[in-house]
Amino acid sequence: MPAPPTRGTALRHRLAELRGPARPPQPLDARALAALAANPGCRRRALLDGAGVDKAALAGALGSPSSFGQSQFAFIRGNAFEARVKADGGAVLLRLVHERLDRSAEPPEPGATHTPDLSAAGPEGRAARTSLALREATGAGAWSLLDHPMLALDVAGSPAFLEPDAVVVHPDGGWTVVEIKSFPVIDGSADAAKVGAAARQSAVYVLALEQVAARMDPAPPVRHQVLLVCPKDFSNLPTASAVDVRKQLSVTRRQLTRLTRIEDIAEALPEGTSFDVERPADELRAAVDCVPAAYAPECLSACELAFHCRDRARAERAVTALGRSVRGELGALTTADAVLAAARGTTGDPADPTVTALRRAAALRAEALGGAHHPAQGARPAPHRGEEAPCR
């Protein structure tokens, strides 16, 4: 008699059904995790990312294709720059790490850097091989460079496999994340938004490294300063700076902890729900809409389904379409109709500070436009033609 499936096996089977049995799962990378951590209340993205659904293909099947993503030109340029940085066994990269982060150690000698082979079968095998390589390099007392290691991070009860550009092990046993980007540093400064996005992405890698370190005895130190490597000015020459990601790490850790477990979201779905893009558009739209979303304008730069979610938010006249700050100010009033009704005095608790502020704003607007006072304040008759308005 066959053994009953374990809870993890049942969950993987359920997630495979959601994305379509014939479709391989899309990997959950650090960029997606950083976006997910920035919006932990979005169950829709948590489930779709956890199930490995191709959100770009899903958005196209829904009739709301997204232009979100990296251009092919930028992708090729980034790969070429990364290859230059890591050439000659990572000599340039390790020199930058030494100059920016660890001048107390002896500089790396050419050809003496340890670069372990991290190849293995599947992401689980690569993650295990990376963990072993980190353990061996930590006690070697020398510089080691791990090129594209594989790290496993538990996210809402489901493993995510992450691949940083590089991890450097210092002679003292400390670990540093290296992030290589193709945007330039001009006259010593780079685009603040791009640097911030790189810091949030690197914080995910640091969090995954901390989980690996926690399984070792003694646990090696994971440095909270990452090395950001970019082209200098308008050349292809690399320059680097140390970026402290402690703030981003704290936020990411807290937000990922708040995520509802994927299995809980999946269990709440109606029977037969599937996000297979081969299904009719109406069925796909019903399947997507049965998972609660938390749309905000910031999603437009971070999620492939943002246009679909924006259209739904506008159709429902949801205040989330106006931004998180507005949504926070309005409290329990979640739609534009509810806000207008509260401002007109037809609904809402007068003791609620939000309702009071809305009614006051409506009265001031009516007064500025020369209309009557708000009904909740007591209407004042409008002056007859030729009659002056009363003084205020």
Image (tube, rainbow, N blue to C red):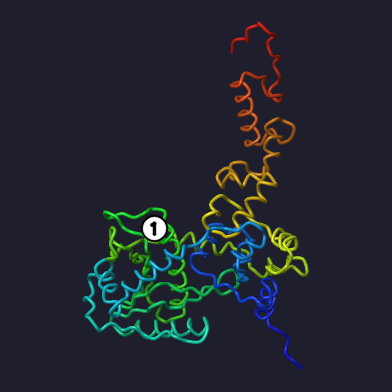
For image coordinates 71% across by 14% down, the residue present is 381
For image coordinates 64% across by 61% down, the residue present is 44
Q: With 61 as the anchor, is 223 left or right in this view?
A: left
In which quarter of the view is residue 319 placed? top right
Image quadrant containing the C terminus: top right
Image quadrant containing the N terminus: bottom right
Number of numbered markers: 1
Q: Is 347 situated above or below 82?
A: above
Closer-to-camera residue (349/218): 349
Crowdedness near tag 1: few (<14), some (14–19) or many (≥20) residues, C-alpha within 10 Å: some
Q: Is 214 situated above or below 387?
A: below
Residue 162 spot, x, y in % from top left: 48, 73
Which element type, helix, strand or loop, lies under badge 1?
helix
Spot the residue most to the top. Answer: 386
Q: Is 92 situated above or below 45?
A: below
Residue 15 spot, x, y in % from top left: 67, 73
Residue 164 spot, x, y in % from top left: 43, 72
Q: With 99 as the anchor, is 230 left or right in this view?
A: right
Closer-to-camera residue (43/281): 281
Give the labeled residue for mark 1.
195
- The amino acid type found where label 1 is placed reads Val
In which quarter of the view is residue 86 placed? bottom left
Residue 293 spot, x, y in % from top left: 65, 56
In which quarter of the view is residue 230 placed? bottom left
Closer-to-camera residue (353/227): 227
For image coordinates 68% across by 8% down, the residue present is 385
For image coordinates 43% across by 69% down, the residue present is 206
